[in-house]
Image (cartoon, rainbow, N blue to C red):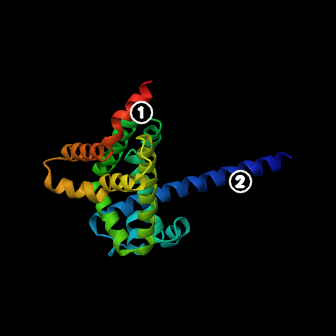
């Protein structure tokens, strides 16, 4: 019985070490993926170059991720987490439509600001790689659904999809990046996106405020 207990403990220890090593390898691969994308671009990035930079084998990369697109998707998830996208829960729990819109615009503008060059390259990958393009499109669809929620909070029923499509476009990386090329700084870009978003939904703002105050 004592031997069995010792065997279980040893297997648990070995399993824990393997999981820890997997986590360390995964983190090393994602760090290398970011460095490769920023310095070399997606076309020059191969599983071999990623293995060399991360210090793990190509087989380990395949075992943990499978494909280049899967590595890129996991990197995007890490960027989103570090960029504050978890705050979307706070956005949807805002006490008023105005506050929900304000938080929504701020969350996405801060996210685009936090990794602008890298996100530009990731979106560029989506334009040339159909598999990863589908990943980008899925994230845009999530943003559209969030926009629909905000539009409904402003009281729109007729034309709600059109308003949501407009809000999704205004909070897109492509729009933010284009504004950032011409305006003086990113704070001005955020202010412009906020102003345009309020104008888009402004027709129902006063009515929503009155209803919520009663």
Residue nearer the viewer, 97 or 190: 97
Numbered label attached to residue 33: none
Residue drawn where x is 45% and y is 65% of the image: 135
Which quarter shows the C terminus? top left
Q: Residues within 10 Å of mark 2 (few under 14, many from 20)?
A: few
Residue placed farthest to the top in the image?
Answer: 214
Dot in front, 2 or 1: 1
Q: Locate residue 129, reporting x and y percent.
A: 39, 74
Residue placed farthest to the right in the image?
Answer: 1
Label 1 SS = loop
Q: Locate residue 140, reporting x and y percent.
A: 41, 59
Residue at the spot of label 2:
11
Label 2 SS = helix
Residue 55 appears in the picture as rendered? no
Compared across the picture, whether 107 is left or right of 29 comes to: left
In the rendered image, which quarter is residue 106 located in?
top left
Residue nearer the viewer, 137 or 83: 137
Q: Locate residue 69, reporting x and y percent.
A: 45, 69
Residue drawn where x is 45% and y is 68% of the image: 134
Q: CA distance from mark 2 to mark 1?
A: 53 Å
Residue drawn where x is 42% and y is 25% of the image: 213
Residue 180 appears in the picture as rendered? yes
Q: Residues within 10 Å of mark 1 (few under 14, many from 20)?
A: some
Residue placed farthest to the front in the image?
Answer: 158
Check if mark 2's residue and mark 1's residue have beta carbons within 8 Å: no
Q: Locate residue 123, reporting x and y percent.
A: 33, 64
Compared across the picture, whether 144 is left or right of 12 comes to: left
The numbered mark, 2 or 1, whose residue comes first in the sequence reads 2
Residue nearer the viewer, 157 or 182: 157
Residue drawn where x is 29% and y is 61% of the image: 120
Identify whether 175 is placed above or below 84: below
Residue at the spot of label 1:
96
């Amino acid at each position: 019985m004592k031997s069995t207990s010792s065997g279980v403990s040893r297997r648990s220890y070995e399993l824990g070490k393997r999981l820890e090593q997997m986590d360390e390898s995964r983190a090393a691969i994602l760090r290398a993926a970011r460095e490769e994308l920023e310095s070399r671009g997606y076309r020059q990035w191969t599983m071999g170059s990623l293995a060399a930079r991360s210090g793990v084998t190509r087989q380990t990369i395949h075992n943990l991720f499978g494909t280049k697109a899967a590595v890129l998707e996991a990197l995007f998830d890490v960027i989103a987490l570090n960029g504050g996208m978890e705050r979307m829960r706070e956005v949807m729990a805002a006490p008023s439509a105005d506050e929900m819109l304000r938080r929504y615009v701020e969350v996405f503008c801060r996210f685009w600001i936090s990794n602008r060059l890298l996100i530009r390259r990731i979106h560029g990958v989506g334009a040339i790689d159909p598999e990863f393009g589908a990943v980008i499109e899925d994230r845009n669809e999530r943003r559209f659904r969030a926009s629909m929620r905000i539009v409904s909070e402003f009281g729109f029923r007729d034309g709600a999809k059109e308003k949501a499509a407009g809000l999704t476009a205004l909070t897109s990386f492509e729009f933010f990046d284009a504004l950032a090329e011409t305006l003086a700084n990113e704070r001005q870009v955020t202010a412009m996106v906020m102003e345009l978003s309020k104008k888009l939904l402004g027709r129902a703002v006063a009515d929503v405020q009155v209803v919520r105050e009663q």
